[in-house]
């Protein structure tokens, strides 16, 4: 089966990121496109899993996390749970990290889990795959509708 790739412009439209954000994140090694990651403009193509990573970064930044926190969570998820962000299951998870740069893990979202982790001084980040993928679908559908009207 052949994989679909997206230009920087398409990726920006579908994820809500700016083209400058995509370029900066490529330069910092946060989300490096599957094809020609060092290029600019049309020579850069993102895979569907790249779009999921971009959408996750955009989501975490939109809810108030710093760039550094979002980058760390994304890197950890990609290393410890490869393919998780591409999973279309409507999972709501939380990323929990020990306070002194300790081990991190993903657990099922539950209010009691969040409160318990906070009470223990742990760092907690929502990983709501359903929200991330819904945003991608919504923005992708808007783009398709706009293209049809033209």
Image (spheres, rainbow, N blue to C red):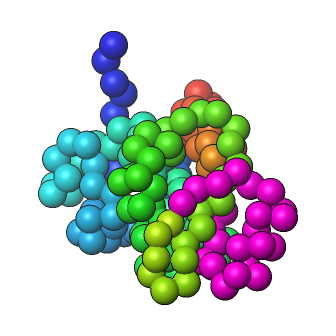
Q: Which range is magenta?
A: 105-128
Would residue 63 be found to the left or right of residue 32 on screen?
A: right
Task: Return the x and y of residue 111 as percentages of the image width and height.
Answer: 84, 63
Relative to 44, say whether 87 is above or below. Answer: above
Q: Quadrant of residue 20?
A: bottom left
> Is residue 107 shown in magenta?
yes
> Is residue 1 shown in magenta?
no
Residue visible at 50% across and 66% down?
104
Q: From the image, which quarter does the N terminus lie in?
A: top left
Q: Nearer the viewer, residue 146 or 140?
A: 140
Q: From the image, which quarter does the C terminus lie in?
A: top right
Task: Return the x and y of residue 108 as percentages of the image width and height.
Answer: 70, 51
Residue visible at 51% across and 45% down?
85
Asked whether residue 127 is in view, the answer is no
Residue visible at 74% across and 55% down?
109
Q: Nearer the viewer, residue 33 or 65?
A: 65
Residue visible at 43% across and 40% down?
83
Task: Return the x and y of residue 84 as percentages of the image width and height.
Answer: 50, 43
């Amino acid at each position: 089966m052949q994989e679909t790739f997206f230009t920087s412009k398409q990726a920006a439209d579908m994820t809500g990121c700016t083209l400058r954000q995509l370029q900066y994140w490529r330069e910092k090694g946060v989300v490096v496109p599957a094809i020609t990651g060092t290029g600019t403009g049309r020579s850069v193509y993102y895979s569907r899993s790249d779009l999921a990573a971009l959408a996750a970064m955009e989501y975490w930044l939109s809810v108030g996390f710093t760039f550094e926190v979002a980058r760390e969570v994304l890197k950890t998820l990609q290393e410890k749970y490869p393919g998780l962000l591409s999973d279309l299951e409507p999972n709501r998870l939380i990323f929990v990290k020990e306070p002194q740069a300790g081990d991190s893990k993903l657990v099922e979202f539950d209010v009691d889990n969040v409160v318990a982790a906070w009470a223990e001084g742990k760092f907690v980040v929502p990983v709501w795959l359903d929200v991330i993928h819904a945003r991608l679908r919504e923005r992708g559908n808007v783009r398709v509708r706009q293209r049809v009207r033209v």
